[in-house]
Each structure stands twice: as structure tokens, then as C-alpha cells.
Amino acid sequence: CISSAASDVYKRQLIVPPVKDKKYEAYGELFHILWENAANTLIEADEIIIIGYSFPRTDLRSNKLFMDSFMKRSSMPKVKILDPFPDKIVDKFKFELGISEENLFVYKDFFTDDFDLAGLFDK
């Protein structure tokens, strides 16, 4: 159940700026619910697509989200990475999260208006 204040925030667009100390608690239950939903989705997904996110070591919360979720999986997902400089992300998924070479698909490219996004889902 979402409180009415959290429900109102949940309906609006929200940008969380990339700062070291994020004020998640200012949004009530919202981020707890969003992170819980994300964790469940990462546990159950057959395919995960990462577009342009570098997984900085300083983003402890997202790194923990992926680590905890992948540890609870019963199968290995396909992971597709779209990034012009994917090497660090690939290493993270291979060596920290245990994704095998055959389940890792890398698209070394920029995400632009003319990128064939549909093709990313079809492969």
C-alpha cells in the first residue's frame, strides 16, 4: 500500500541528480517501493538491457541492487549492453555478477535518435 503522499510523487516525473548523498527519505516510501520492484524484476527477468549506465563504484545502492538480485536468481539472464565504452560494464557483469560470455551481448555504440532500438530487442 502506498501512502497518498508517496502516491502523488509516484505519478510525477522525477529526476534524482547524480550527487553523492541522495535524499531518498524525502520521498517517503516511494524509493523503497521502486527499489523493491526493481529487485524483483532483476530476479525474474530473462533479458536485461543496460543503456549507457556506467555503474560507478560510488553508486553503492544500484551496485548492491544488482548484486543482491543476481545472487537470488535461479537462472542466468541474457544481458545486453549498449554503450560506446562498455569495457568496465562488461567486466562488472562477467567478474562481479557472474554472467557468462554466451549470455553477454555488447553493442559498442551511442544511443542516438537513429539507433535501431527494436533490433536490440529482437536479437
Image (tube, rainbow, N blue to C red):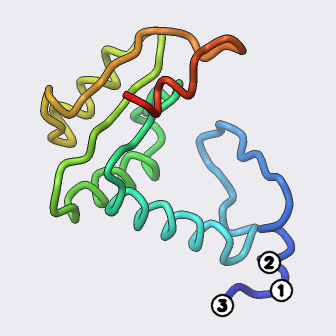
Residue at 59% over, 65% down:
34
The residue carrying mark 1 is 4
105 is higher (above) or lower (below) than 63: above
The residue carrying mark 3 is 1
Q: Amino acid at mark 1?
A: Ser
61 is higher (above) or lower (below) than 43: above
Image position, residue 53 (x, y; %): 51, 29
Image position, residue 22 (x, y; %): 65, 51
Q: Amino acid at mark 3?
A: Cys
Q: Amino acid at mark 2?
A: Ser
Identify the image quadrant of residue 47: top left
Specify few, some or many for label 2: CA neighbours under 10 Å numbering under 14, 14-19, or 20 or more. Answer: some
Q: Secondary structure at mark 2?
A: helix
Depth check, front residue: 15 or 84: 84
Quadrant the C terminus occupies: top left
Contact between labelled residues 3 and 1, with CB atoms less than 8 Å apart: no
Contact between labelled residues 1 and 2, with CB atoms less than 8 Å apart: yes
Residue at 43% over, 33% down:
55
Specify few, some or many for label 1: CA neighbours under 10 Å numbering under 14, 14-19, or 20 or more. Answer: few
Image position, residue 95 (x, y; %): 15, 32
Identify the image quadrant of residue 113: top right
Residue at 47% over, 17% down:
83
Q: Which mark is residue 7?
A: 2
Q: Secondary structure at mark 1?
A: helix
- How far apart in space, not on screen, are marks 3 and 2 (Cα)? 9 Å
Seen as rendered, the residue at the extreme front is: 122
- How far apart in space, not on screen, are marks 2 and 1 (Cα)? 5 Å
Specify few, some or many for label 3: CA neighbours under 10 Å numbering under 14, 14-19, or 20 or more. Answer: few
